[in-house]
């Protein structure tokens, strides 16, 4: 069995497979986009209802004045950490197996930020009041820090997504000259920046990617830290937690990994990328997710054991509502469904499969969303004075806007997948070349057993050995 | 006789319930009437004579005493007096209550007050009236002189170097890096224009 396929043949098949979605579109894609547009339209109708009637159409009132919108803001900003972790951290650490999944992670970052940043504006009720932050904002306010960090992260994420795209856009420009529509050809021509794969350009691009991959990590960490400070710097007992920054960053990376696993599974299936995104990639990400299960459990234990031991001030009320009161179903779903069960799925070899890891990832995402919800609502529900605790439940307007936002997230990803290669062709090819030149042929088979995720490797996962071939399969 | 007793017993419970309901209704009606009567009496009598004494000088942050004396046929004791001042907030205009005081045996109600804003303002003393006297109020314009700020910073530790310039510095460094990356992209474009002619796609990417 051939361990490392010839470089040129591998590259040819890779290009064919990855560029195919950019030129051919199946009926299923249009159906999906149509459905997502409908849901986005419904969400827009709900938003216009809110604009017309005011925030009274939501479940938020004077005592609980943050609800589903702010929970979604925190959730989406959280999953934007996918790009940072998978792309930047793994690139910095030179983890070769990352190459087929970095592009998707970077997509998620940009789209999640574009979605999440809408929610504070939606939550304001009157979007024109955003201007007040610029007219009357104070540098000392965490809200202003939040705006600064999110705009900085969004800009950086766009740049970081774009830089590794340049060689692939040039590839699209050259390969799809007679296949793509005129406007796409124009786009590829302009966006590829006259890339000729020339040594000087490669060196410059390497420098730029190097600068951004180092910079984007602290920027991403700062974003979720500042998001947590919006809560932690407010005088509310349940949010009065010095660990909130680290807790939020860990939670963000946790849900980011889960989101990339789910998206990988969808795109892999939709665009027949089984030859490049292998079960081992899912398992590797599953291990990382399991590590964050432990970190999140540790944070939970550390927070609730210390504050629960003292039960100072309003903590007693918060404990009751969280562990046995109104918010208990949410908390226990998060603790068991969002941490324990996914952890167990990854722990046991029998369930540590592609399907198992994807199931665990879906549970983690649901759990993390619920966690955001009870952090926001639970914090505000604790009475500051001796009055009856308020209750909050989102109305149809809030649920509809949430559905619209999720559909918007999916829609942008779907559109991106038709504009850009979802796998970084040049990175995967370079990694394959490096593997091919580094590993002498006689040793390749043994090596491929050690690194079954090596793209094009001749292990049992090799497409030539039974899995769908890169050039085969249905038209996406 | 026994039948008669049984009939009375049967009727007893509804009768008692009816009586209770009637008593409750009657009590409510009487209470309402009494309350209404009292309200009616308020302002029906002659208003008392009101003497409003304000200090000659008032300044922001300086405590002063607002004194009102109510005289009817004699000093009016035990009457509540409201002290009010006009205010504007978020596009709404109205009167803000500065405080309340009750007159003593000499008919004097005194309120300790600390002005918080300088400039000209009006202070009103209002007596709502009681069963003997009608409502009365007196307003006086006063000039409040500027004074030290009433806001006292009680919390916070100044750490040298931790200020807005640190934030500006960090943000500036990040955006400067972005700008540098943009320049590098410009250099890539430049090399694309001046570089050697592109070979076939197979060579460029193969």
Image (cartoon, rainbow, N blue to C red):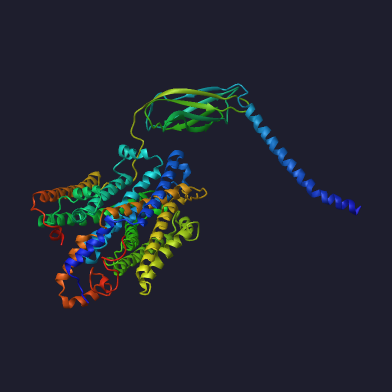
**Residue A249 x %, y %:** 32, 57
**Closer to us: A222 or A431:** A431
Report the label total: 0
Q: Is there any visible trace of residue B142 in the rendered image?
A: yes
Farthest residue to the front: give it.
A178
**Residue B16 x %, y %:** 78, 46
Answer with left or right where residue A281 lies relative to residue B10.
Answer: left
Please tell me which residue is depicted at 39% across the width and 42% down the height of the picture.
A124
**Residue B148 x %, y %:** 33, 33
Please tell me which residue is depicted at 35% across the width and 52% down the height of the picture.
A411
Q: Name the quadrant of the N terminus of chain A.
A: bottom left
**Residue A174 x %, y %:** 18, 55
Q: Tell me where residue B80 sits by quadrant.
A: top right
Q: Name the quadrant of the C terminus of chain A.
A: bottom left
Q: Is there any visible trace of residue B64 in the rendered image?
A: no
Answer with left or right where residue B178 lies relative to residue B133.
Answer: left
Please tell me which residue is depicted at 46% across the width and 39% down the height of the picture.
A53
Answer with left or right where residue A135 lies relative to residue B1.
Answer: left
């Amino acid at each position: 069995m051939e361990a490392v396929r010839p470089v040129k043949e591998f590259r040819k098949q890779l290009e064919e497979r990855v560029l195919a979605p950019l030129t051919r579109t199946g009926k299923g894609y249009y159906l999906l986009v149509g459905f997502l547009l409908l849901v986005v339209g419904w969400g827009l109708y709900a938003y216009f209802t809110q604009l017309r009637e005011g925030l009274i159409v939501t479940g938020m009132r004077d005592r609980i004045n943050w609800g589903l919108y702010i929970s979604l803001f925190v959730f989406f900003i959280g999953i934007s950490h996918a790009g940072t972790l998978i792309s930047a951290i793994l690139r910095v650490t030179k983890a070769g197996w990352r190459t087929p999944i970095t592009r998707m992670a970077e997509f998620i970052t940009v789209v999640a930020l574009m979605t999440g940043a809408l929610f504070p504006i939606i939550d304001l009720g009157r979007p024109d009041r955003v201007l007040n932050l610029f007219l009357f904002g104070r540098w000392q306010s965490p809200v202003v820090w939040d705006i600064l960090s999110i705009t900085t992260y969004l800009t950086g994420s766009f740049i970081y997504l774009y830089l590794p795209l340049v060689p692939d856009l040039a590839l699209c420009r050259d390969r799809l000259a007679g296949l793509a529509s005129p406007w796409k050809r124009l786009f590829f021509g302009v966006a590829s920046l006259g890339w000729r794969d020339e040594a000087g350009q490669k060196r410059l691009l390497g420098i730029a990617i190097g600068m951004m991959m180092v910079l984007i990590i602290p920027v991403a960490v700062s974003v979720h830290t500042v998001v947590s400070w919006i809560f932690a710097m407010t005088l509310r007992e349940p949010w009065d937690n010095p660990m909130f920054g680290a807790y939020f960053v860990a939670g963000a990376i946790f849900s980011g990994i889960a989101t990339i696993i789910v998206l990988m599974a969808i795109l892999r299936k939709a665009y027949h990328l089984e030859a490049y995104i292998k079960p081992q990639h899912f398992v590797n990400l599953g291990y990382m997710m399991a590590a964050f299960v432990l970190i999140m459990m540790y944070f939970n234990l550390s927070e609730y054991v210390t504050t629960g031991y003292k039960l100072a001030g309003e903590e007693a009320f918060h404990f009751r509502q969280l562990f046995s009161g109104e918010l208990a179903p949410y908390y226990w779903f998060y603790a068991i469904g969002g941490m324990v069960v996914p952890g167990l799925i990854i722990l046991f070899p029998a369930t540590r499969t592609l399907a198992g890891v994807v199931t665990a990832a879906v549970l983690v995402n649901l759990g993390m969303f619920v966690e955001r919800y009870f952090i926001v609502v639970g914090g505000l529900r604790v009475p500051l004075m001796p009055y009856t605790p308020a209750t909050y439940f989102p109305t149809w307007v809030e649920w509809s806007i949430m559905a619209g936002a999720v559909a918007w997230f999916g829609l942008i990803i779907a559109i991106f997948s038709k504009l850009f290669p979802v796998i970084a062709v040049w990175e995967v090819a370079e990694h394959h070349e490096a593997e091919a030149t580094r590993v002498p042929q006689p040793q390749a088979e043994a090596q491929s057993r050690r690194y079954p995720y090596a793209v094009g490797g001749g292990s049992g996962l090799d497409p030539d050995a039974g899995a769908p071939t890169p050039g085969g399969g249905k038209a996406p | 006789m026994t039948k008669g007793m049984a009939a009375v017993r049967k009727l007893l419970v509804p009768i008692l319930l009816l009586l209770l309901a009637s008593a409750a209704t009657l009590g409510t009606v009487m209470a309402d009437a009494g309350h209404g009567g009292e309200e009616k009496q308020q302002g029906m009598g002659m208003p008392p004579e009101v003497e409003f004494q304000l200090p000659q000088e008032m300044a922001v942050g300086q405590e002063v005493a607002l004194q009102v004396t109510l005289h009817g046929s004699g000093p009016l004791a035990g009457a509540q007096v409201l002290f009010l001042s006009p205010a504007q907030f978020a596009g709404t205009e109205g009167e803000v209550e500065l405080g309340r005081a009750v007159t003593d045996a000499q008919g004097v109600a005194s309120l300790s007050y600390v002005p918080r804003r300088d400039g000209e303002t009006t202070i009103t003393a209002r007596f709502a009236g009681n069963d003997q006297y009608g409502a009365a109020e007196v307003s006086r314009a006063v000039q409040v002189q500027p004074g030290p700020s009433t806001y006292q910073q009680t919390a916070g530790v100044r750490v040298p170097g931790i200020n807005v310039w640190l934030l500006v510095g960090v943000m500036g460094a990040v955006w400067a890096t972005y700008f540098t990356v943009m320049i590098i992209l410009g250099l890539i474009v430049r090399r694309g224009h001046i570089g050697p002619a592109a070979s076939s796609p197979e060579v460029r990417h193969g």
